[in-house]
Amino acid sequence: MDNYKKTELPEMVKITKIVYENPYVRTFFIGRKIDAQPGQFVMVWLPDLDEKPFSLSYAGNKTAITVEEKGKFTSALFKMKAGDKIGIRGPYGNGFTLKADACVVAGGCGVAPLANLIERLKNPLIIQGARSRDRIIFKGRFKGASITTDDGTAGTKGFVTDVLEAQLAKNKFSIVYTCGPEAMMKRVFEICERHGIECEASLERFMKCGFGVCGQCEADGLRVCKDGPVFPSAHLRKIKDFGSFARLKSGEKVAISDYAKWRCQ
Amino acid sequence: MNLETSLCGIKLANPVILASGILGVSRSLLSEVIRNGAGAVTIKSISLEAREGHKNPTVIAFDAGLMNAVGYSNPGTAGAKKEFTGLKGLGAPVFASIIGQDASEFEKVAEALGGLEFSAIEIPLSCPHTPGFGTLAGQDTPEKTHEIVRAVIKKTKLPVFVKLSPITRNIGDVARAAEKAGASAITAVNTMGPGMIINIDAKKPVLGFRMGGVSGPALKPVAIRCVYDIYESVKIPIIGIGGIMTGRDAIEMMMAGAKAIGVGSAVHYRGMDVFKKICSEMSEWMYENGYESFDGIIGAAHG
Ligand SMILES: Cc1cc2nc3c(=O)[nH]c(=O)nc-3n(C[C@H](O)[C@H](O)[C@H](O)COP(=O)(O)O)c2cc1C
Ligand code: FES
């Protein structure tokens, strides 16, 4: 039966532990068990400031979000200490499917939801990219990741897509999971299309409600908060905005690079 | 069951309309809503210039409805002109919703959107949570309503719907002022309040704007009474909105006097296909009770 009492309100939960992943990124563990699929997200509320979506980087017994400091909201979060409280509602959206013979391609902070996924997959091939050595997140959390850095300070110098191409030339995968900068995900998707391999990508758009009513997060008729954030190839083919356009807070559609700049405020 | 109806000469496959501010930010989402069974759709309200709206949280759900203080975020007339093209191709009528801080701004927005293929223009004079607009700007008085409606109908040949607030003291008088000024229909109602929800652990109001408009089940009895009062006051058709979740709710709203009904918050409770669900539940009820059309249902609770 339909549930007319479905509430969507933030609950204040304690930060139990903060892990410094690198100079720019911290993981905030919270004292609340959230049953979520890898790929699902929560809305984080800092009273008097704002509320923003973050995917869960740990879910189940340990629940956490992993955050890069890049604007007013994240700076405020970085000033918080273990014992402080933040507002949480969710989890929202869908998650990644869990398939065998998977390849996981992560760029920058995109490794957050994927780390949660990797821990539930059986021996996936992991390709993790970062701008430089000091930007790598979750060093040692999973074994055997192929690391690439833009400047060659760790792993191989180059892009995750180069490693993916090389891998696809010699190995078979049933699926490629990806999360990272949208331009990177677009290239990963195009490579998958060329090789006839299923792809799932986790998209990011500015959100308001998070539960599918306001329309703010839409991309070609799909709601990233409700129909996504994880989209399979069938949807990625349909979403013309993928890799190209996103909406500002006013709803104005702009180039994805301008959107990314605005998001860092 | 034939659910076809017409509203100010506009043919609708069914009387279930998407309310403004829910999903209506893009042409492709409107298309999805129509695919899910809506007889017509309303876009999210457009102002002259782009607006960012209030800070988050902007939309929440409590145990009896939704509360929002989106604050009229919208891409302005320039953005709307890019977004809402080729509307005739969508397969159902699309209604514009326009807002302004005064009559001349309303005029300018109506004019700017004139070239697009909207079937009607709705003017909400009733938002309870955006300074400069709606009830916070006193646009819900009979005098202001008259002035703004006159201004808009000068600039458009389309039917003009006036959207009223449930907190207006004598809603019948405002509806009459709208009718006298030349409005083609009344849309009733907008969200109620403003209300407030405080998180007691944070000791803070949850919404970014602190207060917001109440919609969904909590609003329904108030909306039904408003539509009942308006039906007693005017002859022009009424689009009844507020807490409609099911086909039975829709019939109830029609018995209060609505010719068509608007649905917003129910998208949260029953999904995007709520439009189809409400239509089939209405059909079922009508079949069981021996109705072949809406004659005999609309306004049945009066007298
Ligand atoms: C998130 C949200 C945004 C809304 N935005 C607008 C708006 O921009 N313009 C408007 O006229 N009404 C707006 N409304 C009011 C609805 O159109 C409708 O009148 C109200 O929600 C009552 O209907 P419901 O109970 O079916 O939701 C909004 C409502 C919600 C929940
Ligand atoms: S954020 Fe409101 S629909 Fe996605």
Image (spheres, coloured by chain):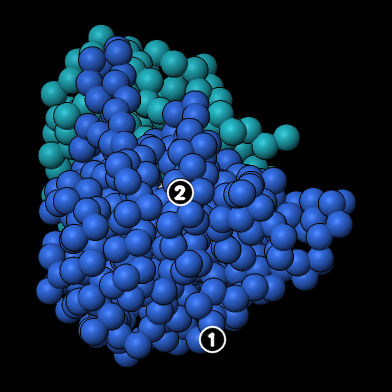
Chain colours: A cyan, B blue
- The x and y percentages for residue A39 are 50, 42
Task: Please name whichever residue, B268 or A52, is drawn nearer the observer in this view of the structure.
Answer: B268
Q: Which mark is residue B43?
A: none
Is residue A64 positioned above or below A176 on the image? above
Q: Residue furthest front?
A: B303
- The kind of secondary structure element at disc 1 is helix
Question: Residue tagged by mark 2?
Answer: B229
- The kind of secondary structure element at disc 2 is helix
**Real-space Cα separation, disc 1 to disc 2, in angstroms:** 37 Å
Task: Please name whichever residue, A88 or B90, is drawn nearer the observer in this view of the structure.
Answer: B90
Chain to which mark 2 belongs? B
Is residue B165 positioned above or below B144 on the image? above
Q: Residue at x 61, y 65 (%)?
A: B15
The N terminus of chain B sits in image quarter = bottom right
Is residue A209 positioned above or below A182 on the image? above
The three-letter code of the residue at mark 1 reads: Gly
Question: Residue tagged by mark 1?
Answer: B89
- The x and y percentages for residue B28 are 48, 72
- The x and y percentages for residue A249 are 25, 56
Residue A170: quarter of image: bottom right
